[in-house]
Image: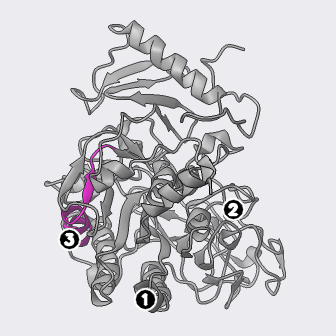
């Protein structure tokens, strides 16, 4: 009997498929220099994060696709740059049409379609459809257009960053205690220039107190009448997320040992503001409340690692640890007050097109396949996880999925070295673009009249020497490649795809 070529190809690929359990830990606003394994001069220790590095692979040139929350999360889950969507700058609030459109492949849907049980516990920040409008909700109705509609079998968490409100402990499509109260940001006594979300709460938006200024370095606390549940307290987030993750994992352990793998996406809210370490961690480290918050984050990660060990599941579980962007602008204060560089050696931080804005910790441990203590020093992006998982599963991505995802499974497992990554695009929160290829990074001009800059990151990782005048040929080549991958709707080989909008204002270098 003759077997069709495509079927034979599929059978060969499936023979080599691997299905480890996967836990993807995504922290919020953590800089490259906030992991002690990456920054020997850090003013606090992160032993559990360091353990992932020691027992796995460190990607020293790993990047988030953007420099703020929403777009990086979109790209992480879809393998596609967020600026191809309707969101060209900044972030979303808690409420709105989900940025991940129905039918778009995600890490969760890919794994679910290949036999995984999937869960998300933590911060979403990609838009949800809540019942009714602010001040006129019917919380008995289900939340729509949310993680359960994007490939996840289970969801427990909060809709977005705490400064956007609609704060309650959601499980599935409902909150056991709905957010029917209101609050405003309150000045923090834990960290300077920071805020809190904590009781007392009010029954109407008008009753919510006027936001105050916070800290010795004054911070305007914008945000009045945030919707909140009466049992929501900001300082409980990390503990609740970890405890709920462990509860869900406990229910998957037996099945995992019998060959039914699980995928847990665990996006923490730390060390994003509010900086709110629990009391037991205060006074630790030498970088103030921020360092204490990082120490607490690391401790919760240790709880996850310990569970894997106790359940004898560590060997065949892939643990991925990374951050959505570089550190908040308070990185400057930490240098001044404590001598701690949250951005490591890199330039600037969150929101910036420079390396400190998007070069982040990127660590993967999988004892069964990844050699302990290894490093990969070539560029990789969080968008690459979708194609990497597809390679792991022996699957080929469809043309309309993972358009900016370049898999590195061979590098991860040591089976082969991949060819150099396709050109990578960086994007700032204000719409400025850069293209990275090998050692070269070309930062484009923008609508704010900034001019082009060219850096050789192999000799100048701090981006101090603009070489655009010395290498006009490199400038032209990279600019042409950036234009092509914008217009083609993809940066990887394949059939061109459409961006979600016509040409937009930030593409100032592309001639009409």
Quadrant position of residue 109: bottom right
Q: Mark 3 or mark 2: name the one nearer the start of the chain.
A: 3
- Compared with 89, 71 (above or below) is below
Residue 127 disc label:
2
- Is label 1 in a helix, a strand or a loop? helix
Q: Quadrant of the N terminus?
A: bottom right
User: How far apart, in angstroms, are the residues tagged by discs 1 and 2?
Assistant: 31 Å
Q: Mark on residue 309?
A: none
Q: Nearer the viewer, residue 316 or 209?
A: 316
Q: Residues within 10 Å of mark 3 (few under 14, many from 20)?
A: some
Do we see residue 448 in this rendering? no
Left or right placement of residue 123 versus residue 229 in this view: left
**Mark 3 lies on residue:** 47
Q: Which residue is mark 1?
A: 253
Q: Residue at x 50, y 48 (%)?
A: 383
SS at circle 2: loop
Disc 1 vs disc 2: Cβ atoms closer than 8 Å? no
In the structure shown, which secondary structural element does the residue marked by tag 3 occupy? helix
Which region shows up in magenta? 43-61
Look at the picture and state if 343 lies above or below 192.
above
Q: Residue at x 72, y 44 (%)?
A: 86
Between circles 1 and 2, the one closer to the viewer is 1
Answer with mark 1 or mark 2, whichever residue precedes in sequence: 2
> Can residue 431 be seen in the rendering of this structure?
yes
Residue 488 part of the magenta-drawn span: no
Residues under numbered marks 3 and 2 in contact, where contact means CB atoms less than 8 Å apart: no
Q: Is residue 498 left or right of residue 287?
A: right
Quarter of the image for residue 129 reads bottom right
**Disc 1 + disc 3, Cβ < 8 Å:** no
Label 1 crowd bin: few (<14), some (14–19), many (20+), radius 10 Å? some
Labels in figure, total: 3
Which residue is rendered at x = 46% and y = 48% of the image?
384
């Amino acid at each position: 009997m003759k077997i069709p070529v495509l079927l034979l190809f599929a059978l060969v690929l499936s023979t080599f498929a691997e299905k480890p359990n996967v836990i993807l830990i995504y922290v919020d606003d953590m800089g490259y220099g906030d992991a002690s394994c990456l920054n020997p001069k850090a003013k606090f220790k992160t032993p559990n994060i360091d353990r992932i590095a020691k027992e796995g692979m460190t990607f020293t040139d790993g990047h988030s696709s953007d420099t703020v929350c929403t777009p990086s999360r979109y790209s992480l889950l879809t393998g596609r740059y967020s600026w191809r969507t309707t969101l060209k700058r900044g972030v979303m609030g808690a409420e709105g049409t989900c940025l991940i459109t129905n039918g778009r492949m995600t890490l969760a849907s890919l794994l679910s379609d290949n036999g995984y049980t999937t869960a998300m516990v933590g911060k979403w920040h990609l838009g949800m459809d809540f019942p009714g409008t602010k001040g006129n909700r019917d919380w008995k109705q289900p939340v729509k257009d949310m993680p359960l509609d994007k490939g996840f079998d289970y969801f427990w968490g909060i809709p977005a960053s705490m400064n956007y409100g609609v704060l309650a402990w959601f499980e599935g499509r409902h909150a056991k205690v709905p957010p029917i109260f209101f609050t405003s940001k309150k000045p923090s006594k834990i960290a300077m220039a920071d805020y809190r979300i904590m009781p007392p709460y009010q029954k109407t938006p008008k009753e919510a107190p006027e936001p105050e200024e916070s800290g010795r370095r004054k911070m305007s606390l914008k945000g009045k009448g945030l919707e909140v549940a009466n049992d929501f307290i900001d300082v409980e987030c990390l503990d609740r997320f970890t405890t709920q993750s462990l509860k869900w994992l406990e229910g998957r352990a037996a099945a995992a040992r019998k060959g039914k793998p699980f995928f847990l996406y665990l996006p923490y809210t730390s060390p994003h503001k509010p900086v709110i370490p629990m009391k037991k961690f205060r006074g630790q480290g030498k970088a103030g409340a921020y360092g204490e918050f990082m120490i607490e984050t690391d401790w919760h990660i240790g709880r996850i690692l310990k569970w894997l060990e106790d359940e004898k599941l560590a060997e065949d579980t892939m643990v991925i640890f990374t951050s959505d962007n570089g550190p908040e602008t308070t990185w400057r204060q930490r240098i001044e007050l404590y001598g701690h560089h949250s951005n490591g050696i890199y330039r600037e931080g969150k929101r910036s097109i420079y390396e400190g804005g998007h070069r982040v910790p990127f660590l993967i441990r999988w004892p069964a396949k990844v050699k302990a203590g290894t490093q990969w020093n070539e560029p990789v992006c969080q968008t690459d996880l979708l194609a990497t998982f597809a390679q792991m599963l022996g699957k080929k991505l469809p043309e309309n999925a993972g358009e900016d995802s370049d898999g590195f499974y061979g590098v991860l497992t040591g089976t082969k070295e991949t060819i150099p990554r396709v050109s990578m695009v960086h994007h700032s929160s204000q719409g400025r673009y850069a293209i990275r290829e090998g050692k070269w990074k070309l930062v484009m001009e923008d609508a704010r009249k900034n001019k082009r800059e060219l850096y050789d990151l192999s000799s100048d990782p701090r981006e101090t020497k603009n070489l655009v005048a010395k290498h006009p040929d490199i400038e032209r080549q990279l600019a042409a490649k950036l234009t092509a991958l914008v217009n083609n709707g993809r940066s990887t080989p394949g059939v061109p795809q459409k961006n979600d909008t016509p040409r937009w204002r930030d593409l100032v270098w592309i001639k009409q």
